[in-house]
Image (cartoon, rainbow, N blue to C red):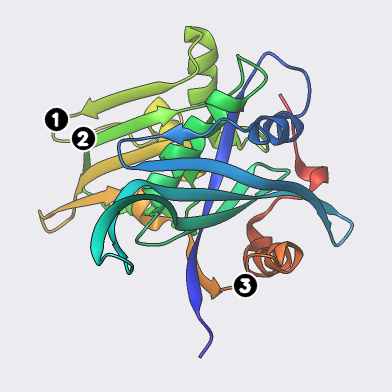
Amino acid sequence: MNQTIQANLGRITHTSFENEKPFNVICRGLKGKTPLSTKSFLYHLKNINRFSVNTNNKVIYGEMFKSKLSSEHQVLNKTNLTYNPEIIDELFSVSRFVIFEDLSIVFTSSHMLNHENFIDIFEQLYHINSEDLFSHIKIHYRKEDFEIFEKIKSFSRLVTVELINIRKSNPTPRPTFEKIEAFLDREKTDVFTALFKSEKEEGLARDLESHIMSGISIADSAYGDCKLLGQKQNGEFEKINIKDKAIRKRIKQIPIEEQENFVNLIMEVFGKYISSEDDLIHD
């Protein structure tokens, strides 16, 4: 039976003062050799390579290694039958990732290096290795197609909406992003988090001119996260966390040395979610 592993789809949002394409800036930043140490583990990036897929798509391939630090074992000395301590730093887990030109990222995860942990460590490793001090990245989950506006419309009222780490879209902005992106520009902010709550009978605004609905739309497209609470027609309340709609697939486990085969598999499974170069709009 073929072994499988979980692969997760996310999107990188990038801010920088550079005029260069984010894809190129990020590729350089990932090639740094500085590791990240925690109390028990060491993390580092390795084998950062660029590939062309089907001559139309350029991707960055890489690996994140998680190693257990200073694990002490009692080792038997067969000569005098005594046990002596020995310190061993050992490989604990490896996650692989592929980044596309539209800044989508697919990464593997397991119980030893779960998806939340991967995102946190990946962002930290990038920030300590990037050559550009003003280059910053965040990763948000890409979501399955989910008619969030239709769901909201079905509520008798929208009670609370929490917008979390909302950022401007890059690339391919949608018309529904316009209100919230204009707000971010007006306030000169890169990241926006807010909690909206209504005690009124009609609830929060739900028309398409609403900044709240615009924020929900941009979060639904992986430029932030959103949690909301609505009241259904029967009076019951329903909570929705957009993060729960994240796109995840079980894929065949490819030998670690077969980088190109892994990239081709990722393209085969996730290619329909990736924007082509012709669709990209760079800030």
Element under label 3?
loop
* 3 or 2: tag closer to the N-terminus: 2
Q: What is the CA distance from the residue labelled 1 to the residue labelled 3? A: 55 Å
What residue sits right under mark 2 in the picture?
203
Q: What is the CA distance from the residue labelled 3 to the residue labelled 2? A: 50 Å
Q: Is residue 16 above or below residue 43?
A: above
The reply to whether dot 3 and dot 2 touch (C-beta < 8 Å) is: no
User: Would you call the spot at circle 1 few (<14 residues within 10 Å), some (14-19), or many (20 or more)?
Assistant: few
Residue, far bottom: 1
Residue 271 location, quadrant? bottom right
Residue, far right: 55
Depth check: give the residue in front, 250 or 29.
29
Residue 254 is labelled as 3
What residue sits right under mark 1 in the picture?
200
Q: Is residue 193 above or below residue 162?
A: above
The reply to whether dot 2 and dot 1 touch (C-beta < 8 Å) is: yes
* Placement of the C terminus among the 4 image quadrants: top right
Residue 45 horizontal side relative to residue 39, left or right: right
